[in-house]
Image (spheres, rainbow, N blue to C red):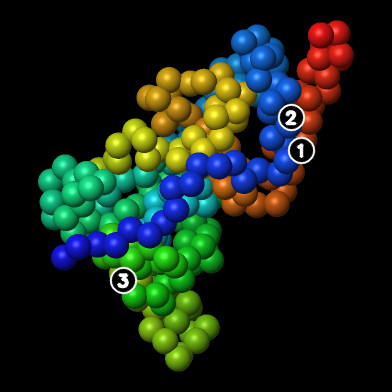
Amino acid sequence: MALVRTRSTDVSPSLPLLLQLTFALLFVFCADKGWCIRVPDQVPNTADRPLKTAVFALGCFWRSEAVFGCLNGVVRTTVGYAGGSKVNPEYRSLGDHAEAVQVEYDPTVITFKQLLDVFWSSHDPRQVFGQGPDVGNQYRSIIFTNGTEESRLASVSKEREQTKSRSSIVTTQIRQLGTFYPAEPEHQKFELKRHPLLLQLIGNLPEEELERSSLASKLNGFAAELCPLRIQKQIDLKINEIMKKAWPALKDI
């Protein structure tokens, strides 16, 4: 069956004009890492606190990754394919897989239950065969679980979501996670990549490092304007600090 992909691939920046101007002013200064946000990427030390992994499907994985990337306790995000039988699926040949996001998180900071709350609030679990303008089986709603306790939490959360309205059925599936296949590099941190000056600001990381970067995960959510308001403001403040350093040097040009 042919699947209709209607999501926009417009790459024009959507950040506020003032922020775009800030990046333009900073562009030349990021050759000196002292002017950039990232000197190297600061990955939380979790040696004594093993990370956990959760996988969700909630429509277009470009947006899904941005939804989770900004949350405190989320260390990194990866988009990919899950829930189907096709081996080694690709973006143009998914088979019966769904677009999904893998979330690596510190369970001492954020819990699976809290991630479920974000899952439910970030899409329409009652929409059948798609999300918004994106039409196709690959956009179906799924909670993937690892073990009995996660399955129980997912079921309880689904029942709670259903009680919010009896006029329509929550279509979300709850499935044991099989193989998660990471998507092609061009789909990782897609929202961040729509803003080349943000990439410049963090040092133009190589693709592999960008995919694994905690900072890139956070900025991916910031670029999509999907961070919690407090975190969005924190990043704005950091950029403003860099601006204050850059402006005196610009005055001497």
Q: Nearer the viewer, mark 1 or mark 3?
A: 1
What's under tag 2, amino acid-wise? Thr
User: Is 121 rendered above or below residue 235?
Assistant: below
Q: Residue at x 42, y 72 (%)?
A: 125
| Residue 33 shown left or right of residue 1 in the figure | right
User: Do labels 2 and 1 touch, CB within 8 Å?
Assistant: yes
Task: Assign a secondary structure to mark 3.
Answer: loop
Q: Nearer the viewer, mark 3 or mark 2?
A: 2
Q: For residue 206, which quarter of the picture?
A: top left
How many numbered marks, from 0 up?
Answer: 3
| Residue annotated with mark 3 | 129
User: Is 160 rendered above or below residue 208?
Assistant: below
Give the percent coordinates (x, y) of residue 1: 16, 65
Give the percent coordinates (x, y) of residue 45: 52, 27
Q: Is residue 81 visible?
A: yes
Query: For the residue carrying disc 3, how many other residues have a C-alpha within 10 Å: few (<14), some (14-19), or many (20+)?
Result: some
**Which residue occupies the extreme bottom position in the image?**
167
User: Is 59 rendered above or below residue 22?
Assistant: below
Q: CA distance from mark 1 to mark 3?
A: 39 Å
Task: Assign a secondary structure to mark 2.
Answer: helix
What's under tag 1, amino acid-wise? Leu
| Residue annotated with mark 2 | 22
